Image: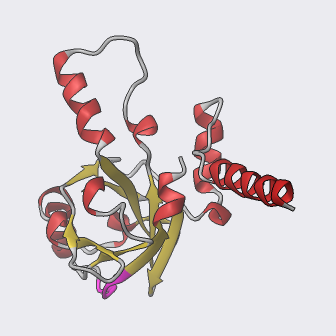
Amino acid sequence: MKRMLIAFLLMCLFSACESSKSKTFKTRAELIKYINNPENGLKKTDSSGTVKATFTYRPAELILPKQMTYTKDQLELVRKYQNSLAFVIGFTANGKEVLNHLQSGQYSGIVQTFGFRMERYIKAIPDGAAAVSAEQCLFLQTFGMGAANQLLVVFDKRKLIHSKKIDFVVGEFGLRTGDLHFSFRTEDLMNI
């Protein structure tokens, strides 16, 4: 009986260790495919009217170049993004870049907001605790050639990883969408 109990406990311990392992990928394309599969919980969408927003996790492996040696500036980036959670938010209207659908008077204001003020509107809320502001937002200029207008949004990982769930909110910033909500399980984000 004692041996069976020990064997059962060892099996439980082994299964727990196996299930908590991070996933590994052989290629960059394999990682991107995994992230873009909605079943894996790393890509969420919300929409209002004709505007659709997609919030996609972007691990450091997809942001930083893999190389043997880094310059001083590159090494600083590596350190920064290892302690960060990064996401790309894409905004579309009718399947095209949202900026292409704006009137000229609204266009320049939204471009200014995308470029310089989005940190004010994007928050992470871990398990209903106090909101955590984005540390950095970078507007990825596509000049009308992309499928979506995109922002790279970076949060301090240390402020978020101790929760079970993180709700991300993009507040109304001029597109008349109201607040957009994206909910991620922390476990899904940490298993890559």
Instruction: Using residue 149 as the reference point, say whether residue 11 is left or right of it.
Output: right
Is the residue 70 above or below the residue 99 in the image?
above
Compared across the picture, whether 158 is left or right of 163 comes to left
Callout count: 0
**The quadrant where residue 157 appears:** bottom left
Q: Which residue lies furthest to the front in this view?
A: 2
Q: Where is residue 85 in the image (x, y as percent from the top left)?
A: 34, 53
Say if 87 sits above or below 41 in the image: above
Residue at left 25%, top 52%? 139
Residue 154, visible in the rendered structure: no
* Residue 40 in view, yes or no: yes
User: For this rendering, which residue is in front, 143 or 183?
Assistant: 183
Instruction: Please provide percent x and percent y for residue 123.
Output: 25, 72
- What is the quadrant of residue 61 in the picture? top left
- Against 93, residue 18 (above or below) is above
Q: In the rendered image, which quarter is residue 41 located in? A: bottom right
Magenta-tinted stretch: 176-180
Classify the position of the N terminus by image quarter.
bottom right
Residue 162: percent from left, percent from top: 36, 64
